[in-house]
Image (spheres, rainbow, N blue to C red):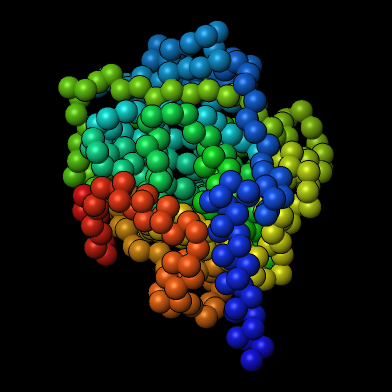
Amino acid sequence: MEMMTKKYYEWVVGVILLYGFCSGSIVGVFGAAPKKAVDVPFQKNYVPSWSADHIKYINGGKEVQLLLDKYSGTGFQSRDAYLFGHFSMRIKTVPDDSAGIVIAFYLSSQGAEHDEIDFEILGNRTGQPSILQTNVFTGGKGDREQRIFFWFDPSKLYHTYSILWNMYMIAFFVDDVPIRVFKNSKDIGVRFPFNQPMKLYSSLWNADDWATRGGKEKTDWSKAPFTASYSSFHIDGCDAPRRKRSRCAQHAALNGGIRRPSKTLMGISIEGSNFGVIFVSRIQWGLLNLVFNSKRKRERSTAVVERVEIKSIREEDDGWRGEEDSEEEKEAVISQTPVFRRRKKMERNLHSVSFTRGTMKG
C-alpha cells in the first residue's frame, strides 16, 4: 500500500510539474529560472581559434556569423578557462539544407585525459528535423552521447543553449528547458569533471562522414556558403587562472551564479535518491516525446542509435535500476493533462522519421 501511495504521489506531482512547465508558470513551480544571457560584444570574452576570415562581425560584434564553404569551416574560443559556472550562447542554426553540417558549442580542457561538455547540432535535409546531441567526456572518455529532436526549427530564430556545471551535476538547457542532467556519482566510481579548468569553444564544420544518417547524407556544396549566427557572449563562470580553485568551489556553490542551494536543479533536490530528477525526465518525455541515446562504441561514423526508455536520469548516469513504469501508465497520465493536445500538435509538425536498432533512417 505504501509503495502504491508513493507511486501515485510521484505521478500527481509529475503532472503538476508538466502542466506548469508547458503553461508558462514554470517559475512558480520550480523556483527561479537560470540566469538569462547578457548581451556583450564578442571581443570581450572570445577570440577566433581558426579560419578567422570565415567569421563575420555584425553590429560592432554584438552578433557574429560563422561561414562554412568547401574550403574551410571556422571556430572561436573563450579568452579564459573556467572551473564551474553557467555558460550560455544564443545560436541560430544553418537554414534549409544543412545535411552533414555540425554546429558545436562546448567546454573542453586540454590533454589526452581531457574533460569536455558538448552541445552538437546535427544538420539535416530541408524539411527534416535537426538533431541535438549532448555528450560528457571525463578523463578523455566519452561514449555518453544522447540525442533528441528539436521541438522547434532552430534556424528560424535565436535560441539559448546553456550548460550549468558545478560540483554536483552538469545540466543542459535549451531556452531554460532542462533536457539532460549528468549527476556527480564519483562516490560509486563514475568519473566527473571537477578539477580541470575548461575553455568554451564553438565551431561550424563539415562532418558528413557521420553527422546525418550515419554519413549517408552528404553536404550539398552547391548551397554553400553555410551560415550560423551567434549572439549574447556573456560568460558567468569562475575564471580559474585568475582565482584560486577554492574560490571556484565557492562560486560553484552558487550554481554558477544561480543563487539557491547547490544540490538542486531548479528547486528539485538531486541528493540521496532519484525521486526528484525523475520529474524532469517525465517533463522531457511529455514535451519532446522523441529521445534517443547514441552509443558509438566504434568510430564516430557508425552512429549507432538506440531508443531510450523513459526512466530516471540517475539510471542513465550511475547504473541504478528501479521499477519501470509501463507505457500504458505513462500514456494514461499524460493524456489527462491540458498539454496533451499541444504535444500531439508538435508531433504532427515533425516530419516522419523511422528508426531501427543500430541504424537511423530518414
* Residue at the image position 40 percent from the left and 11 percent from the top: 53
Q: Nearer the viewer, residue 3 or 163?
A: 3
Q: Nearer the viewer, residue 33 or 19?
A: 19
* Residue at the image position 43 percent from the left and 12 percent from the top: 56
* Residue at the image position 58 percent from the left and 24 percent from the top: 232
Q: Position of residue 255 (x, y in %)?
A: 73, 45
Residue farthest along the top direction in this orientation: 60
Q: Position of residue 249 (x, y in %)?
A: 78, 45
Q: Nearer the viewer, residue 45 or 1?
A: 1
Q: Quadrant of the N terminus?
A: bottom right
Q: Position of residue 221 (x, y in %)?
A: 20, 24
Q: Quadrant of residue 226?
A: top left
Q: Is residue 295 visible?
A: yes
Residue 234 falls left or right of residue 129: right
Q: Position of residue 155 (x, y in %)?
A: 37, 31
Residue 165 falls left or right of residue 348: right
Q: Is residue 210 visible?
A: no
* Residue at the image position 63 percent from the left and 44 percent from the top: 164
